[in-house]
Image (spheres, coloured by chain):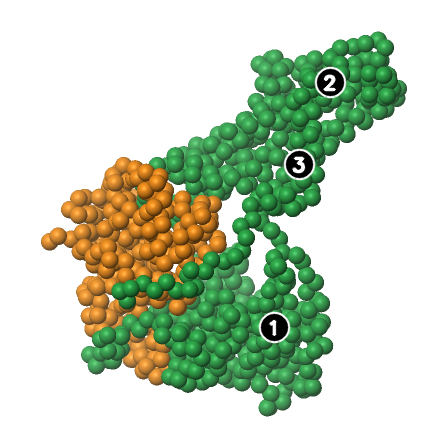
Chain colours: A green, B orange
Amino acid sequence: MTTLIPDPADQQISSVPRRSVWRQLLRDPQAIMTGVIIVLLSLFGLLSPLISPHDPNGASLDAINASPGTAGYLLGGDESGRDILSQLFYSLQTSVVSAVIGAGVALAVGVIAGLVGGYFGNAVRSGTEWLFSLILTFPGLITLIVLLPLTHGDYRWTMLVLGVLLSPGTYRIVRNLVLGVKKELYIDAARVSGLSDIRILGRHVLYAVRGPIIVNTAFLMGTAIASQSGLAFLGVGAKDVPSFGLMIHSGFNNIDAAPLQFVWPCVALGVYTGCMVLFGNSLRDAFSGPRPKRQKPAQGLRLAATAAPTSAVVDGERVDEPMLAVEDLGISFPGSTGPREVVKGVSLTVDPGEVVGLVGESGSGKTQTAFAVLGVLAPEARVTRGSVRIEGRELVGLSESELRSLRGRVVSYIPQEPMSNLDPSFTVGAQLTERVRRTLKVSRQEARQTVLDLLARVEIPDPQRVFSSYPHQISGGMAQRVLIAGAVASRPRLLIADEPTTALDVTVQAEILDLLRGLQKEFGMAILLVTHNFGVVADICDRIAVMQGGEIVETGTTREVFHTPKHPYTRGLLDAILDESAPDGDSARTIGAAR
Amino acid sequence: MSALLAVDQLRVRFGTRRRGTEVLHGVGFEIAEAETLGLVGESGSGKTTIGRAVLGLVKASGGSIRFDGRDITSASRRDRRELAKEIQVVFQDPYSSLNPAMAIGDILSEPLLLQGVSRRDARARVRTLLDQVGLPVDAADRRPQEFSGGQRQRIAIARALAPEPRLIVCDEPVSALDLTTQARVLDLFREIQQRTKVAYLFISHDLAVVRHISDRACVLYRGDIVETGPVGQVISHPEHAYTQRLILASPVADPDRQAERRRQRRQLLDSLEPSGASA
């Protein structure tokens, strides 16, 4: 162990291309179109003094209500004889400035306060929280109008105030993100390195939360432009600053004489703000990463259903039929380069009353195989081939309601994370009673008694108390007992347990394994136990199937596989097990001898 | 006694003074240079809190932590920056402990630059570090999401090694890894220790892992150290009833020996609780 041999697996880096947000945006037609329109319109606005044919406020008697196409007045003139095209250009300029000031202030205030409020302690957060709740209570439009004497009708000051009024939204987004990021271990690692808070906030936190902030900015800009136009339409603020709102107002007054005067500014404003919102949506999609192409799940199922043999389905109670028979099962998921097969032709049988361990490392496909048996694969997963039969009855191709009638009666499930499988807003008793009533079709009173008996059966010391407890009031081990009680309520003949003890402490794990063993004997259940832990397998399983890369590489009785593993992968796994008692002999024996 | 790290009567409370709960009730241990001390315990035993207190991530409410003779119980942020050269950390979750937005090269060089190392020297050091943990040099330009769990943990180890520390706090560094990866990462830890003489405070819930890597071990139970000693002795001749229970509850990867162990565990539990109640 003195020399380090680099393992080939560690030298290999996944070839998944790093897709930047930009690259993602360039592949999205909506982003390209809206982006180009926004840039063009903004350029028109910024260059308006250079490209406008007329002074936007310069009135000419010749141009009053001039129709579009009049020489020098491409889009015609308005009721006062001003050039509409020039007004549109300058209105765009006003909009650009509004958007920059409004969104800029909202971001500056909201992001800084959000970072500070989220990162530092509760006292600071109470302060910022109070402040922004206060800002939220101001009625937006009325505040802007009331503040007119202060802003002197200058829309830029108004936008500054609007920015402050919009900042609570940004603040809340940033504060929530920071509260999440703060718990990440890389922030702790940075603190251990001695980085100052400012540096951590600027380099680690801000970078992590930038996506939603950028997306939010697009919406803020749209809001600022719409608000500025709305105020101008109401006649609030200076009359000599060209604005879509003023143009719409004037066109509205003149709608009978020249309806087009109303249409131009409406279209321009609508397109500009609409593009910002759509671009914001594209940005959000780009930040959330590429989405795999959707597939029709039904297609795969139907295909498999026709391929599967249907001969043994007649009775379902035939004695020679294994409890569970999986044959040549294939499951694929949509990937970025077409379907990716994660289970590649798995065959496996579980006899009645037998405990079979499905062992493998992460990504070996063991959980997907178990999910296929339960009929609870993710919607995008496809069963590409093979069959799954429970007591001779084919599962692949069954409808959801037919599967549901099997689940809970014939086959039950114990999950890995007991806590996340209990609804936090209902008591344990209510959830179990509901389940028992559904599967056993009994009265509420009977169900309640059944549940209490079950809770006692899974060795919960005070069933009555646990019955009326909420999930957060009980420990993880207790929660797993509750789920086991629910799973065995209907006396299923097959129990699928997916890493049932992985989230638990070893002392609790030992108790749960004891409990499972006892229930298995008492009810004569078959158990398919999915696990990565060879200790658990050695403890409870009769037979083992070892999975690697979506295939079963070895099956055999537990003793066979442990003592004479045939496949090199199995040997590698068994060699990698750290034996706690290796150099000093068997510790258990020593304890036993001491007693 | 020339202990590198000496923790004495350490107490930690969470929450306010009136309504808080004490999670460490005065624990003490020492770690010498180039030694590995394993901290074993189940969830809620306070093992992670000890590590975080040593790192300055939680405040001690009593007792002392001394590093190389210096009291660091309530070191300031500035002192911490100095200490970062000496005490480093490898966390459990290789997915959360690396900033997904930063290239590996930046993750590794950031603490070095903070210590005043020049950009050029830092780059050279990053190359050496990646080599030391068995990763290709071009990993520096890549981002964490391109690496597997085991590779990420190697990167986290490289980050911890960057300032050539004398103590690394390892908080469940292999419990999120697959079996084969776990064995290789543990070998890496040992190999690094033999070369650099770094000391480890190795926190784990897994007896086998602690047995494999530690020189000495402390067993924690509900905020107290119930047993300390050479790791072979603690695991082979446990004295405290809790340690015995813990060891007999850990399943052995052998059907026959596990059946025997299961029988002994029943025996022990029955002798502890004559009523025969198991839970």
Tell me the element at label 1: strand
Badge 3 is on which residue? A35
Front position in the image: A558 or B27: A558
**Quadrant the N terminus of chain A occupies:** bottom left
**Residue B133 picture quarter:** bottom left
Q: Which of marks 1 and 3 is in front?
A: 3
Tell me the element at label 2: loop
**Quadrant the C terminus of chain A occupies:** bottom left
Identify the disc placed on residue B109. none
Circle 1 chain: A
Specify the amino acid type for callout 1: Gly
Badge 1 is on which residue? A330
Q: How far apart are marks 1 and 2 (CA)?
A: 66 Å
Badge 2 is on which residue? A52
Tell me the element at label 3: helix
Q: Which residue is drawn at 48% across and 43% down?
A: A208
